Amino acid sequence: MPLAAHRRARRVATAVIPVAALLATALSSAGPANAAATTTTVTVDHPTWATASADKGAVPTATKVTARIYLASKDTSGLAAYAKAVSDTSSPLYGKYLSAAEATARFGPSAANTATLTSYLSGHGIDVTSTTAHYLDISGSAAQIQAAFGTRLDNYSTSTGTHHAPVDNVTLPNGVAAGVLSITGLDGIINAAARPDSVSVAKSIGGGSSSATIAKGGTSATSVPEPCSTYWGQYTATGFPVGYTPTAPTAPCSYYPSQLRNAYGVTKTGLTGQGATIAIVDAYGSPTMLADANQYSTNHGDAPFRPGQYTEYVTPADWTLTGSAPGDCGDWTPEESLDVEMAHGFAPDANVVYVGANSCTDQDLLAAWQLIVDNHLADVVSNSWGEIMHGPAGYFNTSIIAPYEQTLEQGAVEGIGFNASSGDCADNSPTAAATGVNCDSNTTEAQTTWPESDPWVTSVGATALAISDPAGKYKFETAMGDDRSVLSPDGKSWVPFPGYFYFGGGGGTSEDFTQPWYQTEAVPGRLAHYLMNGSYTRTPHRVVPDVAMNGDLITATLVGTSDGGAYSEAGYGGTSVASPSFAGILADAIQAQGGFAVGFANPALYVRQGLYTDVTENPFATGLKNGQTLSAIVDHGYTSTGTHIARDYALGQDYGLTATWGYDNATGLGSPNARFLESFGSGFTSR
């Protein structure tokens, strides 16, 4: 069934990465072979694990089978074309958005097609157990499903157990197939679970059970001889063995919104996101979210939400997979707090709408997107979760892509844009995953993730930001990528040295999506034509991320949450920090252009290629000599038994990715600044 997304932020204490098994059988309608044909063959995205050698024979005919049929737009090609036209800054239709009602009337599923499909299913004895404007949930015996879809279901032995799947493509009568976009669940896998792309600073201790507490989060350890720095280089770490340089600074204290607004030029512009609305999509919902966000704002000198400025859509009675067992979704409260507080922090006057999915499965997260688009709840939507697309059996099947893209295209038609974090595991290779703190160990190859790599999504990567004064004056940025060494028990060396990969912003060249039109001029051919396995592709492919903002675990962001107990604050890092931050930037841009929606932002972002702060691996402002590695020491203090816990981090080491001048696969176009924001109010049309 659906695949799971994982949250992409890290508390500067736990990694959350969804182990999703997006499963389904994607259907793409192929026209009849000739005018006389009476059936349409629907190409099934046959699971790679459903091989002849793994085939264990037919599913017993009485076996209950459930599936979800996603309904096709009445004009799929027209929807895609109009979505591109209103998003393309060079198109005469640019910005001519439709209302939600107009978009649904013009491009929604056909009622007649849905009625035909429903009647056909009923005629085969298949029950329609649930119906929405976007899908039908169905249930029937294997015999009924096989008769209706014209294919046999067989059992297959896989590394994750025995699963059933269609043997051949689905065949439907022409009139029935016209209403079908895709089918998920025919392979019987429903264990998709997404996780947040964030980690807390506390987790960076590395033991989980350590009794040391954290200096960066504002708490006190037994003894912290080297305090965190309120700005880069304020304190030099002393009493430690030599690492990457003769001396190294202590890592920055976790940032708060007013510092970040200063660093990225928001304060200079005077923009506050007034008139714009940001939606946050995560799983479930915290009952104390509004109170926590208001406490956080008050603690750091910002105004709390005004009455009515924050709203949420949650349905606790429908939540599933809420436990912590394998296959469950775990705790999303810190992620929700992070996302809401960062969006509000970068756009204090924007409205914020929180939409909590009923689980972390792809189907439920998609339903949250559909709710936003159907009711035009927001102008920009932030998603700090995702998953790998290539893993073991049942991990990800491309069937879910079509309904997501149909929703993304309708969102674009209405002037709604979607951001997604690019992940915290650099190139997501098995090598990176072997030591990365927020990686999916099930990855089978270097790869980009879903949904950020979809061409209709703005992929937000991350950087490590340094400020030069307590107010947040910008000093430099490098790519989010940390190699970690641990202080030895005797305190005389760093182990190992150089360090191992620990945390890094996601990026790279997608093998699953070809290059969208807006990347043709900006993305170098050495990236677009070479996949992450090193192979050359004649057809250029999508490269991510598109943009980047602070998210490194070492330059963490402070987050306030109750999470079932007393309110507290701690530092978090991850591309989960960057995605809602950039949503706030886009809300500010909407205000800059008089309240006119940016919509699907990527075309407007790429025509502004020269306006970003270019982020490189070893920026000049670090003052380092050629060949020296940027680093910082995090001193966690002493445990109750006297063990000194400290880490030496090499920064800018995004495994398998490189931050260079111009567009790159670690930080995309770069990070926003005042010049970038001001361009939205200056009549800017091209670079």
Image (tube, grey):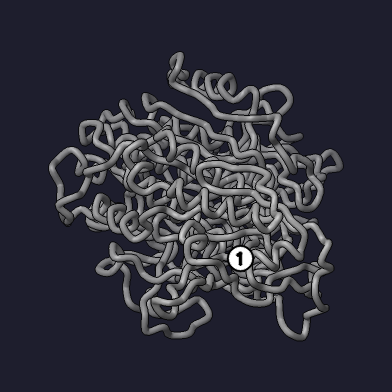
Which residue is labeled 1 in the image?
A: 25
Instruction: Say which quarter of the image contains residue 260.
Output: top left
Above or below — where is 215 with respect to 536?
A: above
- How crowded pointer 1 is (Cα within 10 Å; few <14, some 14-19, many 20+) is rated as many
Residue 166, position in %: x, y? Answer: 68, 71
Q: Nearer the viewer, residue 548 or 440?
A: 440
Q: Is residue 238 visible?
A: no
Figure quadrant of the N terminus: bottom right
Above or below — where is 335 with respect to 146?
A: above
Residue 81, position in %: x, y? Answer: 29, 58
> Residue at 44% across / 69% down in the picture?
513
Relative to 198, 303 lies left or right: left
Relative to 223, 112 lies left or right: left
Q: Nearer the viewer, residue 269 or 99?
A: 99
Relative to 412, 32 lies left or right: right
Instruction: Give the SS element for disc 1.
Output: loop
> Residue at 58% across / 52% down in the picture?
119
Q: Nearer the viewer, residue 12 or 587?
A: 587
Figure quadrant of the C terminus: bottom left
